Image (cartoon, rainbow, N blue to C red):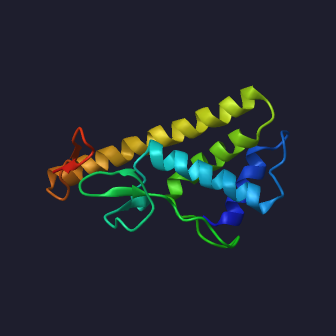
Amino acid sequence: MTYIKLQNMLKLFLMGDNPAPKDPDVLIIALETAYLEIANDCTALKLLTANKGEEIVRSGVGNSFVRMPKLPEEDEDVLDIDKELVPAVGRLMAGYIAKEIANKNYHKAEAKKIVIQYESKVREYMQKQVTAGKYTVVELGDTGEINV
């Protein structure tokens, strides 16, 4: 999905509430914040990397890390997140912007549902990969070092 489509999704989610910010800097900050929440809360397959040169958010599965998604520069840029997670990103952004606490909580809860459903699919996929010998389990030691 492109950035402009996400902006339109946000308008849809906010219909009858506060409008989406017109300031592109505010909108990109909302996107960056939502991306960070998603990267911290679930194992987005598109964000897994072995490249330590990326902006790393946390450890991933196997010998991988979860990287920070790249922000779009143009409206037609494709979002750097798994397609299934785009509605969660939109819901989180709507939650930041919504006027009433009840609406904020609603959007956050909807985002959480999407993330939980996605994470369930990923865990099932990863378990199949581990069983097939394509990944190994990684543990963090007490000092933060990675033990394979």
Name the residue located 67 percent from the left edge and 31 percent from the top edge.
106
Residue 3 coordinates in the image, percent (x, y): 66, 64
Q: Is residue 86 left or right of residue 23?
A: left
Quadrant where the image shows the N terminus: bottom right
- Tally of marks: 0
Q: Residue visible at 58% across and 54% down?
A: 86
Above or below, 35 relative to 51:
above
Residue 95, quarter of the rendered image:
top right
Q: Residue at x 73, y 45 (%)?
A: 13
Relative to residue 88, is residue 31 depicted above or below?
Answer: below
Viewer-proximal residue among 31 and 128: 31
In front here: 61 or 118? 61
Provide residue 107's location: percent of width, then percent of height: 66, 36
Q: Is residue 41 left or right of residue 140?
A: right
Please report the residue visible at 19 percent of the width from the left and 48 percent of the height from the top: 137
Residue at the front extreme, as displayed? 143
Q: Is residue 27 left or right of residue 85?
A: right
